[in-house]
């Protein structure tokens, strides 16, 4: 016949050590619950279900709602007359603390037709200064308003008109030889 090996009795009982006792005590203090696996007699920790809490509201660093960009012209600030072919240094500042606004600059004639001078110039939050040299040699004589459209992609487009209109006058004929 075959031999039967018997497990010693001390191996069928849980063996407790000081480390196990301290570990169980800490687990109880941490809020763990214990269950017994059937047939083992050994308590095993199970953590209670965790209910996630909603994220804490983040502080509002912008000081409120998202504001539309603001364009301010530094030049031209008063009416100006130039000869056809001359240049005008258009200067503006765009302010948008929350976003990077894009600005398009137009020359608007007396009929309301717009000619794009600068398209989609990006601004840097909170404020940035820009300039553009407008060469008038391809424009008809007449009066033009300098117009800026600014967009931050979150607010409606903001339109600003420079306080000074630019009047292009004909160049005088060259002197006779």
Image (cartoon, rainbow, N blue to C red):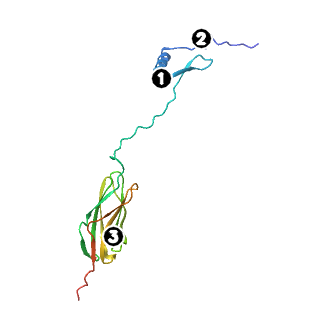
Q: Regarding mark 3 in the picture, which secondary structure is present there?
A: strand
Residue 31 - label: 1
Compare marks 2 and 3 and give the one earlier in the sequence.
2
Residue at the disc numbered 2: 10
Q: Are marks 2 and 3 in contact (CB under 8 Å)?
A: no
Splitting the image into 4 quarters, where does residue 153 fall?
bottom left
Say which of 90 and 159 sits in front: 159
Residue at the far right: name it.
1
* Residue 90 coordinates in the image, percent (x, y): 28, 66
Say which of 59 and 116 sits in front: 59
Q: Are marks 2 and 1 in contact (CB under 8 Å)?
A: no
Q: Residues within 10 Å of mark 3 (few under 14, many from 20)?
A: many
Q: CA distance from mark 2 to mark 3?
A: 97 Å
Splitting the image into 4 quarters, where does residue 136 fall?
bottom left
Taking the image as shown, residue 20 lies to the left or right of residue 133, namely right
Residue 107 - label: 3
Q: Regarding mark 2 in the picture, which secondary structure is present there?
A: helix
Compare marks 2 and 1 and give the one earlier in the sequence.
2
Name which residue lies at 59% across and 11% down. Answer: 10
Which of discs 2 and 3 lies nearer the camera? The answer is 3
Q: Is residue 30 above or below residue 64?
A: above
Which of discs 2 and 1 lies nearer the camera? The answer is 1
Q: CA distance from mark 1 to mark 3?
A: 72 Å
* Residue 58 coordinates in the image, percent (x, y): 38, 41
Say which of 156 and 82 sits in front: 156
């Amino acid at each position: 016949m075959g031999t039967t090996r018997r497990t010693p009795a001390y191996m069928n009982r849980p063996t407790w050590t000081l480390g196990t006792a301290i570990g169980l005590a800490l687990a109880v203090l941490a809020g763990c619950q214990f269950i017994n696996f059937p047939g083992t007699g050994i308590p095993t920790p199970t953590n209670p279900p965790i209910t996630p809490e909603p994220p804490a509201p983040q502080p509002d660093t912008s000081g409120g709602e998202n504001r539309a960009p603001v364009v301010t012209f530094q030049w031209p600030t008063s009416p100006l007359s130039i000869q056809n072919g001359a240049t005008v240094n258009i200067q503006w500042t765009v302010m948008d603390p929350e976003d990077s606004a894009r600005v398009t600059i137009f020359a608007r004639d007396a009929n309301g037709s717009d000619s794009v001078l600068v398209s989609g110039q990006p601004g840097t939050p909170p404020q940035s200064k820009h300039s553009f040299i407008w060469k008038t040699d391809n424009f008809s004589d007449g009066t033009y308003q300098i117009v800026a459209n600014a967009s931050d992609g979150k607010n409606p487009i903001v339109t600003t008109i420079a306080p000074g209109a630019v009047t292009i006058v004909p160049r005088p004929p060259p002197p006779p030889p």
